[in-house]
Image (cartoon, helix red, strand yellow):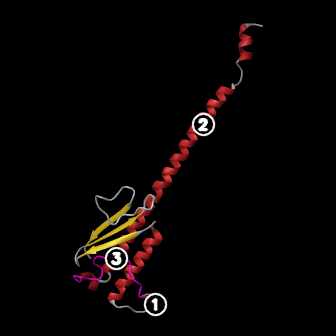
Amino acid sequence: MTVEKRWRQDHTGFTLLEVLIAVLILSIGLLGLASLQANGLRSNFSSYARSQAVILANDMADRIRANPVQAAAPIGAYNNIAATTGDPGCLLADCTPAQMVSHDIATWYTNLQNTLPQGTGTIVGNGTVFTISVMWDDNRDGAVGAGCGAAVSATEGCFSTTFIP
């Protein structure tokens, strides 16, 4: 038997070590893909929550614009709102502008809580300029800020808009 023929017989096929190394490299790649997918889902949810916060803030701004009598009062009913009120049932009966404020606030807080994780919001105004802030638990760790600003953690979702009705 010549040297060339024996070399071909001894070195044909894969060795177990080569197969194990290939499986190891493949498994590391699949773990990387799983991590990439998880990060993509997390970013997708964060983007969805921010979009919903913008929609909800604009919804409240439209509600304030639709009730100019209560919005323009110096100590109007839309000023400095930080908690929900009872809904007077304006969908079933006619309401005064003051009752409409209670309905708007109750509906807005219900929408915040149903749409965003631990969603809450504040409205601060002086009858001329209003600031609407929407806060939520962006990374779902149970932490929600009390307002938007420089002290807000990057893990807490926050959107704020200022407008003149």
Check the image and report above or below for 51 versus 67. Answer: above
Q: Is residue 82 magenta?
A: yes
Q: Position of residue 75 (x, y in %)?
A: 24, 82
Give residue 131's position: percent from left, percent from top.
Answer: 28, 70
Q: Earlier in the sequence, mark 1 or mark 2?
A: 2
Q: Nearer the viewer, residue 77 or 163?
A: 77
Name the residue: 48% across, 55% down: 42
**Predominant SS along the magenta part:** loop
The mark lying in front, picked from 3 and 1, is 1
Which residue in the structure is indicated by mark 2? 26
Residue numbers of the magenta segment: 73-89
Q: In this figure, which residue is indicated by the disc labeled 3?
A: 62
Which residue has dot 1 on it?
A: 92
The residue positioned 32% from the left and 82% from the top of the image is 66
Disc on the earlier residue, 2 or 3: 2
Q: Quadrant of residue 7?
A: top right
Identify which amino acid the numbered label 3 is placed on: Asp
Which amino acid type is shown beneath numbered disc 2?
Answer: Leu
Q: Secondary structure at mark 1?
A: loop
Whole-angstrom CA distance, mark 1 to mark 2, is: 62 Å
**For residue 45, above or below residue 108:** above
Which residue is most to the right? 1
Amino acid bearing label 1: Leu
